[in-house]
Amino acid sequence: MNFLAHQYLSGNSEKIKIGNFIGDYVKGKKYQNYQQEIQEGIILHRNIDYFTDRHPVVLNSSKKLKEGYGKYSGVVLDLIFDHFLAKNWNTYHESSITEFVTRTHEILIKNYLVLPNKVKLFLPFIIQSRRLETYAEINGLRTALEIMSRRTSLPDKTNFAIDCLLNNYCEFKGEFELFMRDILVYVSEERNINVTTPNGWHLNAKI
């Protein structure tokens, strides 16, 4: 899962949201340098990634991207799944995506001093471009892929990714929906995170 999904799956705790946002940038035991609730967010991030990378729906869905991305197909699928989450946001959250992203930005700014340096460097762009919100549109997804291909080791195969998504759109959407059901149950029952959907359905085994 990418930034938007990780924030969505963090529940309501600000510190857990921070930990989940910075999870990829805190390696090994360095998470212990943070206060307890941020540590919990970092561990949550790692658990979500572990669950996602081994889920049969994800493994099957990512095969459609193998030709263009090889071992990086899972990274691209994370972005595609964030696209479907953003596109169908009202199905999964009570607030609008605009309100949710704005609140996320406020939390990140409020906790700016505890963020890793790498996160501090790209955070202004994330906020200014409202990148998490732009995932809802194909052009926003394209931009995110292009940026990643320039700044990371992700292959420059953006056109392949977009064509693959559009040619298999309904299939990807169905796979996303199946996976979201499972990941919501996982963060609720295994990680004790409370997620509330618009219809009032609370996912939390402790309630």
Image (cartoon, rainbow, N blue to C red):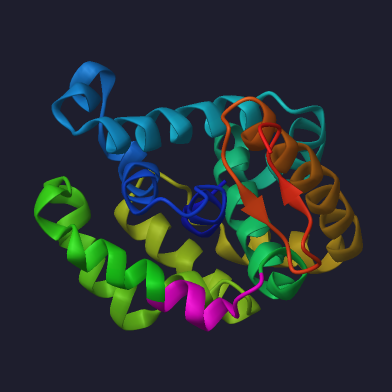
Query: Viewed as shown, does residue 115 lie left or right of 157?
Result: left
In the image, residue 5 sits, relative to residue 75, either above or below, namely below
Query: From what the image shows, is residue 30 above or below residue 147?
Result: above
Q: What residue sits 20% from the left and 67% below the top?
A: 109
Residue 100 belongs to the span the image colors magenta: yes
State the residue at coordinates (63%, 80%): 137
Q: Position of residue 39 (x, y in %)?
A: 30, 30
- Looking at the image, which is closer to me, 102 or 2? 102
Residue for point 60% across, 49% down: 78
Question: Which corner quadrant of the image does residue 108 belong to?
Answer: bottom left
Q: Work out which residue is located at the far top of the displayed protein and give it.
A: 29
Q: Nearer the viewer, residue 110 or 165?
A: 110
Q: Is residue 159 visible?
A: yes
**Left or right: 154, with 136 as reference point:** left
The magenta stretch spans residue 103: no
Q: Please name the predominant secondary structure of the magenta segment in the image.
A: helix
| Residue range corresponding to the magenta coloring | 94-102
Q: Give the side of residue 99 with respect to residue 62, left or right.
A: left
The residue that appears at 29% across and 64% down in the rendered structure is: 107
Task: Out of 110 and 85, give the one closest to the viewer.
Answer: 110
Q: Is residue 59 left or right of residue 134?
A: right
Residue 43: percent from left, percent from top:
41, 27
In the picture, the quarter occupied by the C terminus is top right
